[in-house]
Image (cartoon, rainbow, N blue to C red):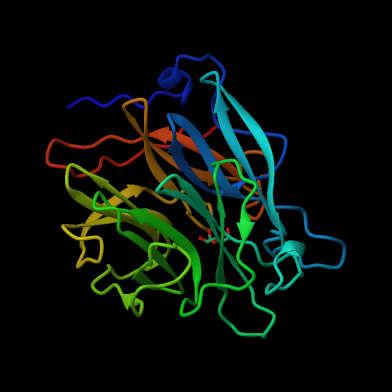
Amino acid sequence: MKIRYPALVLAAVAGGAMAQNPLVTHMYTADPTARVFNDTLYIYPSSDQVPPEGRKANDFCMPGYRMFRLDGGATWTDVGPVLDQNEVPWGKKNSFAMWAPDCIEKDGKYYYYFPAAPLDGSAFRRIGVGVSDSPEGPFEWEPHYIEGVKGIDPGLFVDDDNRAYLYFGGGHELFVVPLKDNMKEIAAPPKKIEHLPTGYKEASFMFKRNGIYYMTFAHTFPQEGYTIGYATSDSPMGPFVYGGKIMDNIGNGTNHHSITKYKGQWILFYHWWDISGFNKLRSMRADYLQFHKDGSILKVKPTLR
Ligand code: FUB
């Protein structure tokens, strides 16, 4: 089968003419979680900033979040700020904290999840949540983090039976926990997902296609560095069977991504350092994703420079 990798992403999908990688250029964006709500494509990324004077240049500087909406098929509108570290009563205000977020819809409400370093000095990040009637917020933030959850990279999934799951982890471990209907509390103790391949790192993203649950993640190989890999299951709780790589190492340092279907086309959202040339000042991007007939994923060839 001959596969085409179109260079202009989303333009062809949505009939516009201008959208291409990187998706926005007025600021640094990373860890893009793309979601389609009410036929509109949104991205909930994290934001990299140049560290203030005196801070190590090699740190992630991430003090808050903005969000983006695709308008007219080719224009990414910066909808504005979602949350700043100073609005999180339980979180540190040192600009290190606000790593990859997610947003999900359940029963007509929109829930935004984010990690932050807690004030108690714990080595683990905690995960906060806010709720809104609109995918664009404003979100009403819970005053405390979700009890019983320690880790980064909150990834949400609502199954066809309307049950919601939170995936989180980091440091080569991934956990899953069912959420209560209020989406703010866990419904059972978190379960470690076993049998992930050697080199599983972080940044999980779950989606379902044709009854198959796909767990995608950042994956490191000694000779190759960061890649994006995936595993499949017949349950959102696993066990998962490794399926292969979705993208080779592109020198990112990290590989947080998401996958969504928009106007009939599956798209991989990821980041690279297009503008800065530096892997702590990233820019979000997108490329088409394709499947073989048996459900396996074809490796994406990124449209780099
Ligand atoms: O961007 C900050 C952190 O680096 C993310 O939360 C991780 O997934 C990794 O990409």
Which image quadrant: the N terminus?
top left
> Looking at the image, can residue 205 be seen?
no
Q: Is residue 116 left or right of residue 204?
A: right
Q: Is residue 233 left or right of residue 4?
A: left
- Identified at 45% across, 50% down, the residue is 104
Residue 196: x %, y % from top left: 27, 68
Query: Is residue 69 placed above or below 47 in the rendered structure?
Result: above
Query: Is residue 60 placed above or below 14 in the rendered structure?
Result: below
Q: Quadrant of residue 23?
A: top right
In the rendered image, the residue lying farthest to the left is: 294
- Identified at 65% across, 55% down, the residue is 280
> Of 90 and 50, which appears nearest the observer?
90
Q: Is residue 224 left or right of residue 87?
A: left
Q: Quadrant of residue 201?
A: bottom left
- Identified at 25% across, 74% down, the residue is 194
Residue 220: x %, y % from top left: 40, 63
Residue 102: x %, y % from top left: 50, 53
> Looking at the image, can residue 243 be seen?
yes
> Of 112 and 143, which appears nearest the observer?
143
Query: Is residue 287 placed above or below 51 in the rendered structure?
Result: above
Query: Is residue 284 placed above or below 201 in the rendered structure?
Result: above
Which image quadrant: the C terminus?
top right
